[in-house]
Image (tube, coloured by chain):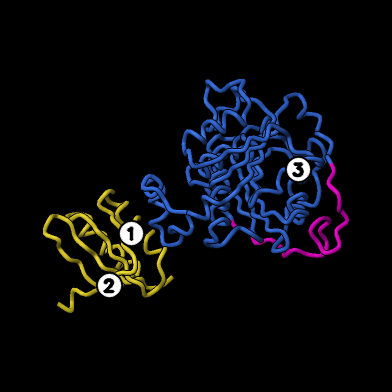
Chain colours: A blue, B yellow
Amino acid sequence: MAFTNEQLERYSRHIILKEIGAKGQKKLLNGRVLIIGAGGLGAPAALYLAAAGVGTIGIADADVVDLSNLQRQVIHTTADVGKKKVDSAAETMEAINPDVKVTRHYDFVNSTNILDLIKDYDFIIDGTDNFQSKFLINDACVMAGKPLSHAGIIRFRGQLTTIIPGQGPCYRCIFKDLPPKDAIPTCRQAGVIGAMAGVIGSLQAMEAVKYLTGVGQLLTGYLLTYDALKMDFHKIKLPPRGDGCAVCSDHPTITELRDYEQVACQLGSHGQQS
Amino acid sequence: MAENEIREDEFVDVTDVVCPVTFVKAKVALDEIDEGQILRIHLNGGEPAGNVPRSLKEEGHEILKLADNGDGTFELYVRKVGD
């Protein structure tokens, strides 16, 4: 496909980059990314990927916009309160860039729908805020061989890794299993600084862009942590993918997806996203 | 007149856009041709005639000729280097 003059102008700052060029921009336009959770992490990721011209972006979320979301979920506006997050997010993305096709999945991911949901995408972004979803998404991506950006944020801290099944450790290699109930507060209970979602969600978008264009080195095999109060970034080398992982080792003990029990304290509000 | 006999493989007109899209359009056209082939670029004088050759040279391509058409436009001949 040939670029229109309007596209050349829109994507000029990308195409000028030696590493991206016209070829890289075409890869972005042909790229397909699924963002699970149109919340704190998903918002900046969706905005940057739409602006970048990623041709097909899926947004999965079964929530509606709440006033308390707006402190960090920058894809939604005050006028969107009460609207489905997938609709609010899609409208913003389409307004930014008409080149982008946004697919709205008005659903929470679960063990029965996730494999079907991820199968048509090149790269998955986990923008959820709970361990049940994070383990489910990890296990499904490992089973389906889908590249995944994991991230988590709380208070003034964030973390991020990129999982390429078979090429490095997965989320379960690092964290094994869900923490005990109430051992870890959610960001609803603990709070989170809004810009943290912007920093970490933007890094997830960066990993997606690098994966789609084949540029640079991904965070595969590393966990990046960010402490905003100390302004410390740490890139921690992870142990290699070993025999011990229940889902991604050569002899996995987890071969079927399951839904983990929702932690009781999260049920008071119907949110899934950070 | 031997010096004028550069035969281009492809042609692109960048007089319908302004900097830096002039360079972007030229770069995209170069992406479409093979290494060693020659692209003729029709561009406006002033900023484009100054910037486009310099930027393409920085990318490693070989500038063969910049000819003044006498009407405020130029023809730039570039040989693609690298792929």
Checking the image for residue B7, the label placed there is 2
Q: Main secondary structure of the magenta part?
A: loop
Q: Is A73 inside the magenta-drawn segment?
A: no
Q: Residue at point 43% right, 53% down?
A: A2
As shown in the figure, which amino acid type bears the numbered disc 2?
Arg
Q: Are marks 2 and 3 on the same chain?
A: no
Q: Residue at point 71% right, 49% down?
A: A119
Residue reaching furthest to the right: A253
Q: Residue at point 70% right, 34% down?
A: A186
- Few, some or many residues within 10 Å of mark 3 (<14, 14–19, 20+): some
Q: Quadrant of the C terminus of chain A?
A: top right
Q: Is A239 inside the magenta-drawn segment?
A: yes
Q: Is residue B82 above or below residue A226?
A: below
- Please name which of the two marks, 2 or 3, marks the residue nearer to the observer: 2
Q: Secondary structure at mark 3?
A: helix
- Determine contact: label 1, label 2, CB under 8 Å: no
User: Which region shows up in magenta?
Assistant: A235-258
- Please name which of the two marks, 1 or 2, marks the residue nearer to the observer: 2
- Determine contact: label 2, label 3, CB under 8 Å: no
Q: Name the foreground residue: B42 vs A168.
A: B42
As shown in the figure, which amino acid type bears the numbered disc 1?
Ala
For marks 3 and 1, give the CA distance.
Answer: 44 Å
Residue at label 1?
B26
Q: Secondary structure at mark 2?
A: loop
Residue A68, position as x, y percentages in the image: 60, 24
Q: In the rendered image, is residue A230 in sight? A: no
The answer to which image quadrant residue B48 occupies is bottom left
Residue A100, position as x, y percentages in the image: 52, 41
Q: Name the foreground residue: A201 vs A25.
A: A25
Residue at label 3?
A114
* Number of marks drawn: 3
